Image: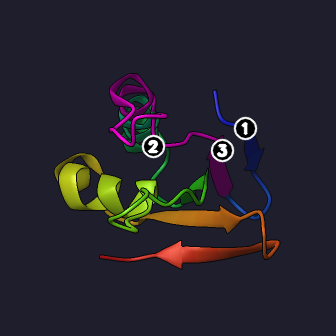
Amino acid sequence: IFDLGCGTVKWLVECKSHRWTTGHNVPSAKMTVWNEAMYYFHGAPSDYKKILFVLRDLKKGAGESLATYYLRTYAHLIPAGVEIWEYDENKGIGTRVDI
């Protein structure tokens, strides 16, 4: 179900590479996929570290990243302890996203 997982160090990672639409709108169908990942994280063992790792994509004009948008609008679906990380492909680094 998850893209990465390890029973030894107890990690589960789900990776997504989604962007704002070409019209700079929310990719609603993609957000449904992120919600599905939260559902699976909810059912995963509580002693596992859970990470949603996504591509950093900024909305033109507003500058809001898709991950920040998700945290702002779907926080009620994110289980306690789940971390959201963004990968900046230009800088080659990942950063944890917090509200």
Question: Of circles 2 and 1, which is in front?
Answer: 1
Q: Earlier in the sequence, mark 1 or mark 3?
A: 1
Say which mark, if any, is on residue 41: 2
Q: Are marks 1 and 3 in contact (CB under 8 Å)?
A: yes
Q: Nearer the viewer, residue 21 or 68?
A: 21
Q: Residue at x 65, y 50 (%)?
A: 13
Q: Which amino acid is tagged 1?
A: Asp
Say which mark, if any, is on residue 15: 3
Q: Which residue is the site of mark 1?
A: 3
Q: Is residue 48 visible?
A: no
- Give the side of residue 42 with respect to residue 8, left or right: left
Q: Residue at x 35, y 35 (%)?
A: 35
Q: Say whether residue 30 is magenta.
A: yes
In 3D space, how far apart are the residues under numbered discs 2 and 1 (Cα atoms)?
12 Å
In 3D space, how far apart are the residues under numbered discs 1 and 3 (Cα atoms)?
6 Å
Q: Is residue 27 above or below residue 74?
A: above
The quarter of the image holding the N terminus is top right
User: For the residue labelled by badge 3, is the local secondary structure a helix, a strand or a loop?
Assistant: strand
Q: Residue at x 54, y 76 (%)?
A: 96
Q: Where is residue 77 shown, x and y percent of the image?
A: 24, 46
Q: Which amino acid is tagged 3?
A: Cys
Crowding around mark 1 (Cα neighbors within 10 Å: few <14, some 14 to 19, many 20+) is: few
Q: Nearer the viewer, residue 75 or 4?
A: 75
Q: Which amino acid is tagged 2?
A: Phe
User: For the residue labelled by badge 2, is the local secondary structure a helix, a strand or a loop?
Assistant: helix
Crowding around mark 3 (Cα neighbors within 10 Å: few <14, some 14 to 19, many 20+) is: some
Q: Where is residue 93 shown, x and y percent of the image?
A: 76, 75
